[in-house]
Image (tube, coloured by chain):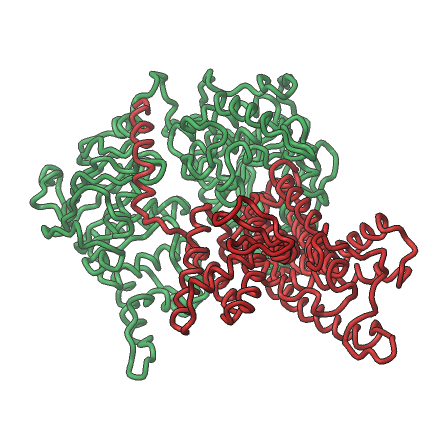
Amino acid sequence: MTGKVTMGGSLGKSLLSILAGLLVAGIIMQVSGYNPWQAFSALWQGATGLHTGTAAPNDLSLGAGKFAIHLNRYNLAQSLSKMTPLLLCGLSVGLGLRAGLFNIGAQGQMLAGALAGGCVGFIGAPNGTFPMVLHIPLVLIAGAVGGAIWGAIPGIMKAARGVHEVISTIMLNFIAINLATYLVTHNLKDPTPGKMAAQTAPIAKSAWLAPLVPGANLTAGLAVALIAAIAITFLFRRAALGYEIRAVGLGADAARTNGIAVEKTVIRTMAMAGALAGIAGAIEVMAIHHRFMPSVSANYGFDAIAVALLGGLNGGITLAAFFFGALASGANFMQLQTQVPESIAGIVQAIVILFIGIRTFKPKQSVLVAALLDDERRLDDEPF
Amino acid sequence: MSYAVGTLQLNNPDTALIRMENITKRFPGVVANKGVHLYVQPGTFHAVIGENGAGKSTLLNILYGRYPQDVGRVWIAGEEVTDLLHSPADAIKRGIGLVSQHYALIPALSLIENVMLGAEHALPGGFLARKRAEARALELSEQLGLGNLPFSARADQLSVAAQQKVEILKALYRGAKILLLDEPTATLAPQEADALFALLQTLTAQGATIVFVTHKLREVEAYSHAVTILRAGRNVGDFITAETQRDFLLQRMIGTRSGTPLNTRTDLTGAIASDSTYPMIGESPFNAPFVPQPPTSSPLFQIENVTILNTRRAAAVLDINLSIRIGEIVGIAGVDGSGQRELSEAIIGTRRIASGKLFLSGRELTRHNVRQRQKLGVASIPEDRHKNALILDFDLAENFLLGHERDHSWGGGRLINRPRILGIVDEIIRRYDVRVGHHGAPTLAQNLSGGNQQKLVVARAIESQPRLLVASQPTRGLDVNASEFVYRTLQGAKERGLGVLLFSLDLEEILRLSDRVAVMFNGRIVGVLPRGEATAERIGALMTGADSALTLPQGGQLP
């Protein structure tokens, strides 16, 4: 392992990074001849659903007249639906980072989970033989298992032969994507005559997650992601396993010398990370596509790296996932409204991560000054 | 130029080659130097002594341009350079060279490439002037009588002593007239240390000025012209060595704390004062009272025909037999790299044994993992405190839990009981006198001094109530007081019936504590001496392979 990946930071540092990202985006828009204020206004409205002006029929409104604030539930729901896989995959990457592992493979793990979940989802298609309350959890479990297997492979490779996880997870991403493409054009292709698309047949209706806001993609999958976030926080606050993972991440040699099974912990961590991404895949299948296809994972597994780096761990990943989810969905809305290309969101994301990568914004001097008073006292207390 | 006693004007700032005044340097958590002055006269051999954490290394690093001082002024050869030393490059330009505790050689580069590094000349076309560099390095090494250094060998193939020679050569190659050495003998065998000092004396005779940091008073007494003592970041005296005595220097160095008479390191008789500050194991809040066991002759731990391979699959330890009895300290002496590290790792369980067996109380544990051995009663004080013993980013409570995170009596288990651990560790901090400042158990381990870190490591090992304690270099880098603490603890552990395996490069330590001394050379045990027969001379002869009665395979390679 070479060097540690800087992960998260103070809230202030994260906010500063985000501001820097938005500032650069604003400058690019200005230079390209767009009106950044209009664009940001549309971005905000698309991201949060909050707007002033005329309320649409389905909006929730606060206040009245000129000062009324309206909430477009569809826009907010779209942001939250993008947040769901980002949060799960962000937790996946973040979990790995805690053990000192840079899991670049959330993308492949998510696909593996989607495939496994999809297979279980087919049971009883088109309408399903199981009741929904049974079928949906089964698909989630299948997704977790699929992702866990895909995650455990680089874990085992690292533990047994020291293969660096960055290399192996990237390679496994390629394998997952190409395997998925092969399957949906061959063995698992939708057999319906006339259907040419590279995708499977729909899964059973009993495994469909219903939208919470009509027309939007938001489902109870978000609750699953939030529960996972709470579970991970608990893991690191209270559980011995979380302690062992941190020990391996911060001092593998000391952990080994003191009897922690480092290799086993690495495999476990990677399997758990894979399971989280796999659940994201299963949710995307059940909530949005209702079938398996290679594009199920979109770019979530890679964007999740940004989420984990911005978020750190303690609750920060949830906020970061919301931020990037809202940014993506807001940018979509912005393009419709103002013709500013939505790829500007990608620029914001990249700038934010570049700034997070700067280890500290504070000049060295201030650290020393902060420690100064404290030390004077301690030195003078020493009995000479 | 060398000085006769009386002609050395110790603190004359006008004649001083190095003049540092009122130096103050703070780090987060410590004030390393507080208003320190240092005057080094040209051509002298100047020792800077002090306990660990006294600020010796910091002072050298300021002079070498590695750290900027917060307050204070520096002159070199009469010229003020206070604001001119921004980096080691600036210091090198002014003729200063530093050989630090951790050698800065690049393992994969050849010796000559290491010597040239940073001072290389290019031929037209960007090619390295390797021949020229080699000629110059050879000339320098001949001047110094360094012998035939293998200039084309890779740096990682050199012994520790040879690496140090290369570091010195590196400094001189860059034209250093002032040589700073930070604890140069910490990793050397006695004979190698003597050779080093002979070399340094040659250098001073040729006009170089040497400042060396140490806490070994014997070296100060034997070789230095002048000595500066630092204590807790302050200069507490400059002396002409010939006019002082060891006891006086020691007193100055450690100060008089709490009025208890000190057991000094200079006492080689092995008499340990039964000091009341030894932490009693039985008082532990979460362990059952310990029943003291009388020393017996029954074997506790046996090593039978053990062979261990190193990472290059050569034999690092070859066919070793040794047994440790209940209530016995067995010291393992040897030059660094004789197989001690591999043997200690194999006993703890982090290194695989190629052949042979280990028994604890008759029970074989050759194939047991670390955790299983811990449960059977093997505990360790690992050699590298920062790498293997502690996690510096963990706080004291988390570090104390390391290895016991699944143990309910320690506050571990599937769910960790943090309040319970904090309670236990606060108690440990009190009983073992770990100085942590006002935050207590939640203090990060990296904010403790080395001695206090080691106290926590020792406490963790002792409190697990082991039967066998493997202590590797347990006082390395510790000051006198912290070392005394470790000695008392090991002695106390022995009196309570533990078997202790003490790996140490410090012969004084071995002689003082051990009931028997086993000497390793080239991966073999070349002699086991009972206390009465173990003398520094005999051990020294054995550990360098000078004992002609033994014929050994070269390099410990497997036949």
Rendered position, A29 above or below B186: below
Q: Position of residue B417 (x, y in %)?
A: 63, 29
Residue for point 42% across, 26% down: B269
Q: Is residue A264 visible?
A: no
- Foreground residue, B493 or A126? A126
Who's red, chain-wise? A
Residue B316: % across, % down: 58, 53
Query: The N terminus of chain A lies in which quarter of the figure?
Result: bottom right
B37 and B82: which is toward the camera: B82
Please count the marks in the image.
0
Q: Name the residue at the bottom extreme.
A: B125
Task: Report the side of B243 relative to B185 (left or right).
Answer: left
Q: Quadrant of the C terminus of chain A?
A: top left
Left or right of B112 on screen, residue A325 = right
- In the picture shown, does residue B84 fall above or below A190? above
Tell which chain the image draws in green: B
Which sits in the foreground, A244 or A12?
A12
Residue drawn where x is 31% and y is 57% of the image: B168
